[in-house]
Amino acid sequence: MTANDPNSQAGGLDHGGKARRTRRRTIVRRIVVLIAAGTAVASQLTVLFGSTQGSEAAFSAAKDNASSAFTTLTLSTPTALTAKPLGAGVGLTWSGGNGAGYVISRSAGSSSSCPTTAVIASSTANSYTDATPGAAGSWDCYQVATSDANWTSTASSAVAVQVGFVATALSMSGTDTGADFVATFNQPVSSASRPRNGDTVCIDPADGIVLLASTTKTGACTTHETTAIGTVNGVTGSGSSRYLATYTWDADGTTLTITLGTLISGTGLSGALAVTGGGTFTPATSLTSATGGVPVCTTIGLCTPMMTING
């Protein structure tokens, strides 16, 4: 083989026709990815590559993924949800739930219908007080769901509550002395605004009125008398009468029984009363709730129930 023989050049063939090994440039690719969940996630990426020596690139970054969360819980739906008016607000309580907390939802509704509710608050306890519900006399619907991180259970059954301090019912049974009027409110009545001993009940079918817990002690009924409980309009019957009365509250302070006593003035009722034109009960504006001292609602149609006659 001569010096001019091409086979003698680097990268050529040896005498046996075999290919020489040629040193090839090394391509190194290294990828290191470190991922950790929690309050910090760090990522590091380094890539070394190239067709020639010194051709390389390096990348590094850090990202906070604090909102990432996982749960293996099957969240249970809260049960036994109750909603009660508390002054101008609404108090909620419930049972059950196995997450970190709860979400509370609300919508405007009625006594018989609850549309889809929207989230208004969260709680870590099995209770919540909504301080800003709807207007007095209106109805709000509530639901509650268990929550854990970004997950929530199915919502509880909806419950409806009439907002504010409201007289919900008035009934009368019996005639003349011994007859009872029963007034019901949606939350306890403050002791300071309840009737006093000596307040009277005056019934005047001629004017179609019943005055409950009037501060007037004697004489015929007049429409301008001050009452501690309220006035019924739209009654018929015979025998204008003013009675002494006793006032008995239940343990909760929400139901009042007014029993007619001694006849003070008039002829006495000669038969049962009847209601015409609705027999509307308008509560006295002096009544306030035991919680918060909220004045009673007197909005016609929402807070003025019709008196019922029970014989």
Image: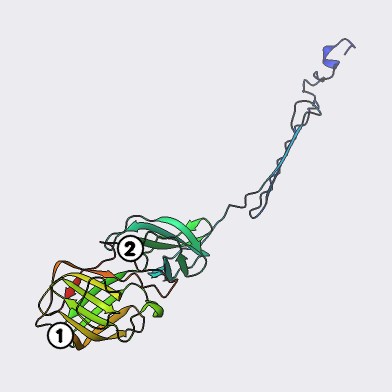
Q: Is residue 78 left or right of residue 300?
A: right
Q: Nearer the viewer, residue 163 or 195?
A: 195
Coordinates of residue 220 in the picture (x, y in percent)? 19, 79
Q: In the rendering, which numbered label is found on residue 176?
A: 1
Q: Nearer the viewer, residue 176 or 66?
A: 176
Q: Secondary structure at mark 2?
A: loop
43 versus 14 height, above or below = below
Q: Amino acid at mark 2?
A: Gly
In this rendering, the answer to whether 48 lies above or below 194 is: above
Quarter holding residue 235? bottom left
Above or below residue 144? Residue 176 is below
Does residue 82 appear anywhere in the picture?
no
- Residue assigned mark 2: 137
User: Could you say which quadrant of the image residue 53 lies in?
Assistant: top right
Q: Position of residue 93 (x, y in %)?
A: 43, 71
Q: Quadrant of residue 243?
A: bottom left
**Element type at mark 1:** loop
Determine crowd level at label 1: few under 14, some 14-19, many 20+ residues with C-alpha closer than 10 A: many
Split into 4 quadrants, where in the image is the C terminus?
bottom left
Q: Name the residue type under label 1.
A: Asp
Q: Which mark is residue 246?
A: none
Extreme residue toward the bottom, this view: 262
Is residue 296 something one can see in this rendering? Answer: yes
- Residue 280 location in percent, x, y? 21, 68
